[in-house]
Image: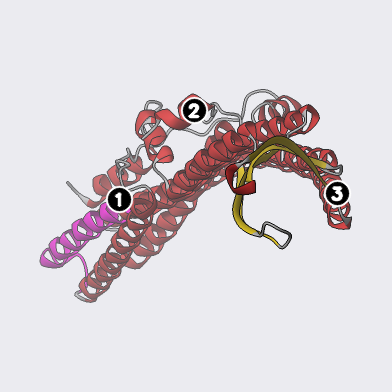
Amino acid sequence: MNAVHAVSLALALTFSLSAHAEYLPDPVAAEAALWASPTVAQARGDFAAQALRGEGLQRGREEWTVGGDLAQRRIQSTPRDNQAEWGLVVSRPVRLPARAAADRALAGALNAHAEANLGEALHESGRQLLDLWFGWLNAFSQSHLWQSQHALAEQQLSNVNTRIRLGEAPRSERVNAEAALAQVRLQQQQAASREQQARNRLRAVFPELPVVADTNFPRPEQPTGNADEYVNAVFEHNHELVRARRQAEVLQAEARQLAKRHSVDPHVGVFYKNEGGGNEHLLGVNVGLTLPGAARRTDQQAAEQLSTVAQQAVVRLEQRLRVEARADFEAAIAQTANWQQAERAAQAQTESARLAALAYSLGEGSLDPVLINRRLALESQLMAQQAQLDALSAHARLKLDSHQLWPLDVDADSAHAHP
């Protein structure tokens, strides 16, 4: 294989894009990795804790109180006597129906918020997985490209040695070719190190995820539909907005619960007394009222204020998310256009490198133009490859946020079903 064929093959490999390339994690493996991620594991723990808290609210916090007394009655009149007396009291606060309903409403709001929080944790873990995956994919593809360049530089050095033996090139060109090979070897080692570091970062967060991919990436395509359709699709499943709404509902439910507690608390119980040295027995009912103080009113006012702030935050969040969703859609379109321009530039520079290598193989010119054009072609290839991955990453992000990439919806059954 001569230098012209080697250059042509290496550059052709860079731009051979397979429409069936698998560049994203396997969906089943990705779903399992998301459920096992630290963020989701913490959210699942919060979900279980809120479920228990909700159960406590459903049952009520009113508890039995048991009391007793022991006395010694001393009779000073005739006949004098000392009589032991004792009593037993059992009482319990009464939860009124309105307060019980407020507690149940708060329990439901807490469970709904925990479910939304788990969904948002899944979504954020999905975004983190994509960021780490494409970070590794970029380093992996660069390492692969530098490997092909290393083979090409070795072939170029062999070709220079052949021309020197034939007396068609000065010996100084061997020095230039060896220097070029050394530089490529250094870049290859650095690229391999970056690839390993990116792999380690990915495995640190998602240790069970298989880190394999095809370097023949598909051609990025423009997102389907328009920005309004995409924004609506995102808002059908936006966990961040749902979580904020559920948080506002929790604060509203807490305010209602405190409002129901802004009244007297009745206590009902029974008592038994043994008096007169056992000659008298008393059995009766006692009723008590706990009068509310100023603290209950201030607690209710604070909860109402927090609820108002949370509702205002929901409105602002929705506005921000709409702007961000539209910006993401427009960015994906721009990234695809950037890749198309970068690919055209890389193909033009590749052709220039091919012609320079062809001229050198025919005995025309020196090695310097070949090395310069190859370096420029390599830089163009790296830029085109980066633009391609940026476009694919932006498109994957659109699919993730619109729930078209991996299953991110959560319900109580799925929260307990996953390990």
What amino acid type is highlighted by mark number 2? Pro
Residue at (29%, 57%) from the top-left corner?
A: 360
- The amino acid type, in three-letter code, at marker 3 is Leu
Q: Are marks 1 and 2 in contact (CB under 8 Å)?
A: no
Nearer the viewer's eye, disc 1 or disc 2? 2
Closer mark to the observer between disc 2 and disc 3: 3
Tag 3 residue: 291
Question: Looking at the picture, how far across and down is residue 299, in whole percent?
Answer: 82, 53
Instruction: Find disc 2 in the rendering and name its residue.
Output: 407
Observer-nearest of 153 and 237: 237
Task: Judge left or right: residue 418 versus residue 87.
Answer: left
Mark 3, secondary structure of its residue = loop
Give the label on residue 144, or none: 1
Helix, strand or loop for disc 2 = loop
Q: Position of residue 68 (x, y in %)?
A: 60, 50
Side (left or right) of 350 relative to 120? left
- How many angstroms separate mark 1 from mark 2 (CA)? 32 Å
- 399 shown above or below 273: above
Q: Using the image as rendered, state which of residue 76 and residue 151 is in the foreground.
A: 76
User: Residue at 69% of width from left, 34% of height from top?
Assistant: 109
Quarter-wise, where is residue 378 in the image?
Answer: bottom left
Q: Quadrant of the C terminus?
A: top left
Q: Name the residue: 63% across, 24% down.
A: 224
Please, is residue 401 above or below residue 66 in the view? above
Task: Inspect this view and state whether residue 238 appears.
Answer: no
